[in-house]
Image (cartoon, rainbow, N blue to C red):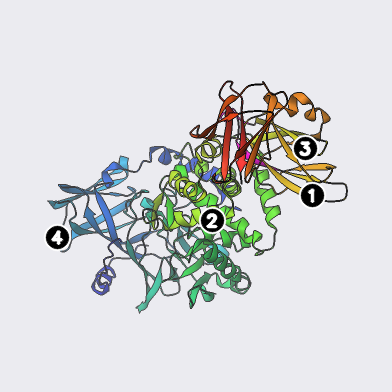
């Protein structure tokens, strides 16, 4: 468990108060990105998480700010408690834009020497004596300035509805624009206090619980306290005239959680009729993924004048109130806030999950749409272009990180396919294990860590899946032919891909077969190579077939036809033999069209080629007892030839 440092704030507030005043849908508004990208590109190309900030671990920030929403300016003091990570730490580096002006740096009452490094956007502070590894220390930086206009708008002053407003949005690289911080994805701040001084006409929203609201002269001072680990890009303030009301969520362990709503006065009546959706969504997410991660504090919304939403920890900033936006930003409290992507390469761990949870609300009967419609919409967005990976290959580009087609929609559909491959029980258990992993919870994660938890829960290897669907680009196109002869159904499945980065997508393929009287069944074929032929026995005559009726696989331009040629001897008896029944529960039969007349050595292996057992094939039909095999996918291989076939153990 991380240490939390409880700091007495009264004297600090009084001292700081004397500082002189200065005169989607996606959760990021994609429509604004092209324009923002042009303004921010030079800065982003230069961005790297500075190795100079890696010598210490941030434990606590006291963030004291003076702002006036009529003026684009900030002044204040940032006090940082930190622990040295190495012996001999003598210079402390913070990320800070050179537009901010430092007035002083203190260690207690002692003034410290410092210098700004404009080309690296760093502040370097000389400590009075080198620190030993594990040693706790603190510094206070007093500063002021007009933050640069970069990124999504990391620090914005505007007048929505004619009311002056000021807000921050630091993801991905904007925190250093408005406060000296450690801007990376490897060190969460254990605890923060946010103290905002502003003219008395305005309210200030921030992370955590509002523990004090003081009037001093013509100003109000708002003190927010947050006692959970938080990454720097999720620290935020929004200041304007707000109407305030609360909703309440019944919690699984009893009691209620407050959902605190700060909304523009002119919108208050309308918004009150919409935020109840958050209550329903939180009850569902509590059930599926565990109790809301910040349950000892609050959840909330603060309206701001932007075209989307931002999942600031415990208080999402909202530019609208649609069901999907409320669900999406709430979902981020688990995926993105409790567990944060450890690299912008893995932003789908934030955005893909939040998008998929939008769809889950529809699947569970919450919201004004259906899960099928949601799936179709997101699939169509992904399929609108032939390439693109979920993995972000250019983390200098805001456009690429927050690409709505890839990081959001394809990330969500990737999760839907993982759920299909694993089954509901293993998928949801694996995701819960991922969220609760002590090495990840309230910290950072990479894609391989999610994969490991899903593999453990499902008992299967997902390397091939992630190579194809996460790192690879595009999607498959299926051409299916089927025929029924003498009660036996033959199905041939061919596949091409939309992008050369993947030559074949190995997936379980569902097909619905329907009789002329309406009798139907869905059969699942473990598709291991293009042109693979499968044999099944059905108790009814098939009149029609439908490919992937429940939209389990991301694919396009598929065809499925009845072709009697599929049932000819050459195709029916692929390589002269076939396996049945497939899937098998207790007995698997190997049947020959023309038995060679002598015993044949053979083996059963797993998908990685590891031998499970060896045996001899004798006679036209050989029966294998597979009752003791764990459920999964296996290969039967004739050792005298390269001939092999896949079967499923139920």
Q: Which residue is mark 3?
A: 489
Task: Look at discs 1 and 2 and give the one toward the viewer.
Answer: 1
Q: Is residue 110 above or below residue 375?
A: below
> Marks 4 and 3, Cα distance to the nearest angstrom?
84 Å
Mark 4 and mark 3 residues within 8 Å of each other at the beta carbon: no
Image position, residue 78 (x, y; %): 29, 60
Front residue of 634 and 590: 590
| Residue 268 placement: quadrant | bottom right
* Residue 91 left/right relative to 618: left
Task: Look at discs 4 and 3 and give the one toward the viewer.
Answer: 3
Element class at badge 2: helix
Image position, residue 542 (x, y; %): 83, 42
- The residues colored magenta run 498-510
For the point 70% across and 49% down, which residue is it? 550
Front residue of 413 and 400: 413
* Residue 360 left/right relative to 464: right
Q: Which residue is mark 4?
A: 110
Q: Which residue is mark 2?
A: 428
For the point 79% across and 26% down, which residue is it? 568
Element class at badge 3: strand
* Residue 21 left/right relative to 498: left
Mark 4 and mark 2 residues within 8 Å of each other at the beta carbon: no
Q: Which residue is mark 1?
A: 520
The residue carrying pointer 4 sits among few (fewer than 14), some (14 to 19) or many (20 or more) residues within 10 Å by Cα, namely few
The residue carrying pointer 2 sits among few (fewer than 14), some (14 to 19) or many (20 or more) residues within 10 Å by Cα, namely some
Circle nearer the N terminus (4, 2) = 4
For the point 32% across and 51% down, which residue is it? 182
Image position, residue 557 (x, y; %): 73, 36
> Marks 4 and 2, Cα distance to the nearest angstrom?
53 Å
Circle nearer the N terminus (3, 2) = 2
């Amino acid at each position: 468990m991380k240490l939390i440092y409880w700091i007495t704030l009264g004297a600090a507030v009084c001292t700081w108060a004397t500082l002189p005043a200065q005169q989607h849908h996606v959760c990021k508004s994609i429509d604004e990105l092209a324009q923002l990208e042009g303004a921010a590109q030079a800065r982003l190309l230069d961005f790297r998480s500075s190795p100079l900030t890696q010598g210490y671990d941030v434990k606590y920030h006291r963030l004291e700010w003076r702002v006036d929403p009529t003026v684009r300016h900030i002044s204040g003091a940032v006090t940082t408690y930190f622990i040295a990570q190495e012996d001999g730490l003598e210079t402390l580096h913070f990320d800070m834009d050179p537009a901010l002006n430092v007035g002083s740096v203190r260690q207690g009452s002692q003034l410290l020497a410092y210098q700004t490094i404009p080309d690296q956007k760093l502040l370097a502070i000389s400590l009075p004596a080198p620190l030993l590894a594990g040693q706790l220390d603190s510094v206070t930086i007093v500063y002021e300035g007009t933050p640069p206009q970069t990124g999504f708008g990391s620090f914005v002053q505007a007048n929505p509805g004619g009311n002056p407003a000021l807000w921050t949005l630091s993801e991905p690289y904007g925190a250093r624009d408005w406060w000296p911080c450690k801007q990376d994805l490897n060190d969460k701040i254990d605890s923060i206090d946010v103290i905002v001084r502003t003219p008395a006409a305005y309210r200030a929203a921030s992370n955590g619980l509002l523990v004090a609201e003081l009037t001093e002269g013509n100003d109000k001072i708002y003190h927010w306290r947050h006692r959970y680990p938080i990454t720097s890009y999720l620290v935020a303030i929004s200041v304007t005239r707000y109407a305030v009301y609360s909703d309440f969520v019944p919690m699984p362990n009893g009691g209620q959680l407050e959902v605190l709503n700060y909304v523009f006065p002119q919108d208050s009546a309308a918004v009150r009729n919409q935020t109840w959706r958050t209550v329903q969504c939180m009850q569902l997410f509590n059930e599926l993924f565990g109790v809301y991660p910040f349950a000892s504090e609050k959840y909330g919304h603060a309206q701001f004048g932007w075209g989307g939403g931002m999942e600031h920890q415990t208080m999402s900033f909202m530019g609208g109130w649609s069901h999907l936006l409320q669900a999406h930003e709430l979902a981020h409290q688990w995926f993105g806030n409790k567990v944060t992507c450890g690299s912008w390469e893995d932003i789908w761990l934030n955005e893909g999950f939040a998008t998929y949870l939008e769809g889950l609300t529809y699947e569970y009967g919450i919201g004004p749409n259906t899960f099928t419609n949601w799936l179709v919409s997101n699939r169509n967005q992904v399929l609108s272009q032939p390439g693109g990976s979920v993995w972000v290959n250019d983390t200098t580009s805001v456009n690429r990180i927050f690409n709505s087609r890839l990081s959001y929609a394809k990330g969500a559909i990737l999760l839907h396919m993982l759920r299909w491959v694993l089954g509901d029980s293993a998928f949801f258990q694996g995701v819960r294990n991922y969220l609760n992993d002590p090495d990840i919870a309230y910290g950072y994660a990479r894609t391989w860590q999610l994969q490991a938890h899903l593999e453990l829960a499902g008992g299967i290897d997902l390397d091939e899946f992630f190579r194809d669907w996460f790192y690879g680009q595009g999607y498959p196109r299926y051409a299916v032919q089927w025929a029924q002869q003498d009660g036996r159904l033959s199905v041939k499945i061919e596949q091409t891909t939309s992008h050369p980065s993947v030559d074949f997508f190995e997936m379980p393929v569902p097909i619905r077969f329907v009789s002329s009287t309406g009798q139907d069944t869905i059969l699942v074929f473990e598709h291991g190579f293009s042109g693979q032929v499968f044999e099944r026995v059905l108790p009814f005559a098939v009149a029609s077939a439908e490919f992937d009726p429940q939209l389990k696989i991301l694919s396009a331009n598929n065809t499925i036809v009845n072709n009697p040629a599929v049932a000819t001897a050459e195709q029916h008896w692929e390589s002269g033999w076939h396996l049945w029944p497939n899937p098998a529960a207790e007995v698997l039969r190997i049947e020959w069209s023309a038995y060679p007349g002598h015993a044949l050595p053979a083996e059963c292996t797993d998908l990685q080629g590891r031998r499970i057992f060896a045996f001899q094939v004798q006679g036209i039909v050989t029966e294998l007892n597979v009752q003791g095999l764990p459920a999964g996918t296996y290969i039967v291989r004739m050792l005298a030839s390269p001939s092999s076939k896949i079967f499923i153990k139920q």
